[in-house]
C-alpha cells in the first residue's frame, strides 16, 4: 500500500527536509511543489498501522514539517505502465502512446 502526504515547510527548510525524506527507505517520491502545502511525500508502507507510525516518526524527526493532508492507497491497479494482480505482480503492460494516435494495446507478459 502507499501513503501520500502533503505538508507545509518553510521555504528555507525545503532542501534540508527534502534530502532527509528522500533517504528514508519507505520513500517512493518526494518533491517541492508550488502550493501552500509545498511538499509532497509518497511512501510505500506495509499496513494502515504503519501510516500513523511513519507520520509520528516524521513529526518527531522534523518538527518544522507540518503534515496537513494524507491519502492512503490500498491497492494499485496499474503502476509505472504495468497492470497488477491483487498480489501486486505484473499481469500485463500498457505501453505509453508517445505519438498520441491511438490508445496503447494491452500486452501480456510472455510465459
Image (cartoon, grey):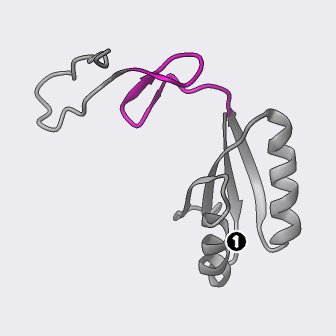
Give the camera-side residue of 49 and 31. 49
Q: Is residue 84 magenta?
A: yes
Relative side of 71 to 90, left or right: right
Quarter of the figure with residue 27: bottom right
**Element type at mark 1:** loop
Per the image, the residue denoted by label 1 is 9
Mark 1 residue crowding within 10 angstroms, few (<14) / some (14–19) / many (20+): many
Give the camera-side residue of 7 and 78. 78
Give the percent coordinates (x, y) of residue 75: 61, 25
Name the residue rendered at 40%, 37% in the picture.
Answer: 80
Relative side of 62 to 83, left or right: right
Name the residue rendered at 59%, 20% in the picture.
Answer: 87
The segment highlighted magenta reads: 73-91
Count every numbered label the image shows and give the total.
Answer: 1
Relative side of 48 to 15, left or right: right
Residue situated furthest front in the rendering:
111
Give the percent coordinates (x, y) of residue 40: 61, 57
Quarter of the figure with residue 24: bottom right
Give the percent coordinates (x, y) of residue 71: 69, 39
Name the residue rendered at 73%, 48% in the picture.
Answer: 69
Image quadrant where one finds the C terminus? top left
79, above or below 64, in the image = above
Relative side of 10 to 94, left or right: right
Residue situated furthest bottom in the rendering:
12
Q: Is residue 66 magenta?
A: no
Image quadrant where one finds the N terminus? top right
Name the residue rendered at 25%, 29% in the picture.
Answer: 95
78, above or below 22, in the image = above
33, above or below 86, in the image = below
Amino acid at each position: 500500500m502507499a501513503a501520500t502526504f502533503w505538508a507545509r515547510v518553510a521555504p528555507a527548510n525545503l532542501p534540508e527536509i527534502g534530502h532527509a525524506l528522500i533517504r528514508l527507505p519507505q520513500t517512493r517520491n518526494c518533491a517541492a511543489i508550488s502550493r501552500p502545502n509545498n511538499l509532497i511525500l509518497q511512501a510505500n508502507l506495509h499496513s494502515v498501522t504503519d501510516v500513523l507510525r511513519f507520520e509520528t516518526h516524521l513529526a518527531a524527526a522534523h518538527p518544522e514539517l507540518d503534515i496537513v493532508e494524507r491519502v492512503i492507497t490500498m491497492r494499485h491497479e496499474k503502476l509505472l505502465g504495468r497492470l497488477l494482480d491483487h498480489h501486486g505482480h505484473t499481469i500485463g503492460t500498457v505501453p505509453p502512446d508517445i505519438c498520441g494516435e491511438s490508445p496503447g494495446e494491452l500486452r501480456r507478459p510472455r510465459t
